[in-house]
Image (cartoon, rainbow, N blue to C red):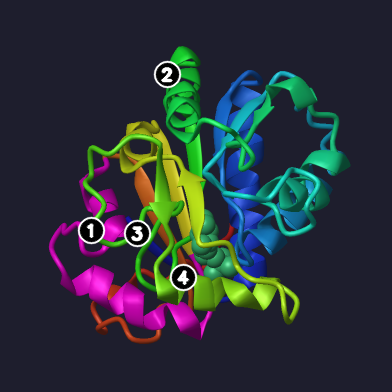
Amino acid sequence: MLQIFPDTSTIAEHVSATLVAKIQSKPDAVLGLATGGTMEPIYAQFVAHAHRVNLDVSRLTSFNLDEYIGLSPDHPKSYSAYMREHLFSHLGFDTSRLHLPDGMTQDLEAHCKAYAAHIQAFGGVDLQLLGVGGNGHIGFNEPGTPFDCPCHVVELAEQTRIDNSRFFAEGLMVPRSAITMGMAEIMQAREIVLVATGEAKAQIMAEWYQQDVTERIPFTALKRHPRARIILDEAAASLLPPEARQQRMVAVG
Ligand SMILES: N[C@@H]1[C@@H](O)[C@H](O)[C@@H](COP(=O)(O)O)O[C@@H]1O
């Protein structure tokens, strides 16, 4: 289902309310968490909302989508550091329940298998948050990734490294590879919320809308998911055909 909101702050309120409701109804839920600029206002809003309603997050389990290979959790540009900065350090999480792939692992293949098995051991993800790359990647599942692919190592597409270089100071290289949750684990999530904001996502959203399900655009897989929502702001929706732009959300909540 496609939903278009006026701007990033109404999206943040809406997604935050979705998260709070999920956690209130299932305090031991398993969340699939994403990083990237899109998620920053969402986590900020969620932290404020959680404080307001005194939300108990201590029984939650989370699995992050991905991590760069070669960056330790202490590296400021690791996704581990991102999660601490934007979410984990602000609320009373049980840190032993918060999982990210280990970018410093010595045995990549074994680690990927163990990460996938760990998610299965928890019965899969209840609610998966996703952003989307300019080339349609989700997590770091780049175009061409088979839809049944589990957690794996990926060589990042040149476009992805260029897009993500804005997060790295000049002279710091974007890593060439990453560990990502696979399309398989993502598609097994019971509920998926994908958020795309800003003009930079307008082109890929138009392609997503026009194309059938294709591995060339990984997030088209969500068209086959029974409970996936694609949430856009006006800018990301700006190249959609008029009939798609009818899906405007006027109310928040
Ligand atoms: N691995 C992450 C993705 O999980 C994220 O969804 C995407 C979009 O990022 P942004 O929200 O910064 O546009 O970029 C990265 O490559």
Q: Nearer the viewer, residue 181 or 242?
A: 181
Which numbered disc flags the more N-terminal residue, 2 or 3? Answer: 2
- Give the magenta-colored segment's residue range: 196-225
Q: Residue at x 37, y 53 (%)?
A: 141
Q: Position of residue 13 (x, y in %)?
A: 66, 57
- SS assignment at label 2: helix
Left or right, residue 31 beside residue 4: right
Q: Which residue is mark 2?
A: 120
Distance between the alpha carbons at the discs numbered 4 and 2: 28 Å
2 or 3: mark nearer the eye:
3
Q: Which residue is mark 3?
A: 142
- The image quarter containing residue 226 is top left
Q: Please, what is the three-letter code of the amino acid marked with disc 2?
A: Gln
Q: Which residue is mark 1?
A: 144
CB contact under 8 Å: marks 2 and 3: no
Report the residue that reaches farthest toward the left. 212
CB contact under 8 Å: marks 3 and 4: yes
Q: The N terminus appears in which quarter of the rendering? A: bottom left
| Category of crowding for the residue at label 1, using alpha-carbon neighbours closer than 10 angstroms: few (below 14), some (14–19), many (at least 20) | few
CB contact under 8 Å: marks 2 and 1: no
Q: Which residue is mark 4?
A: 160
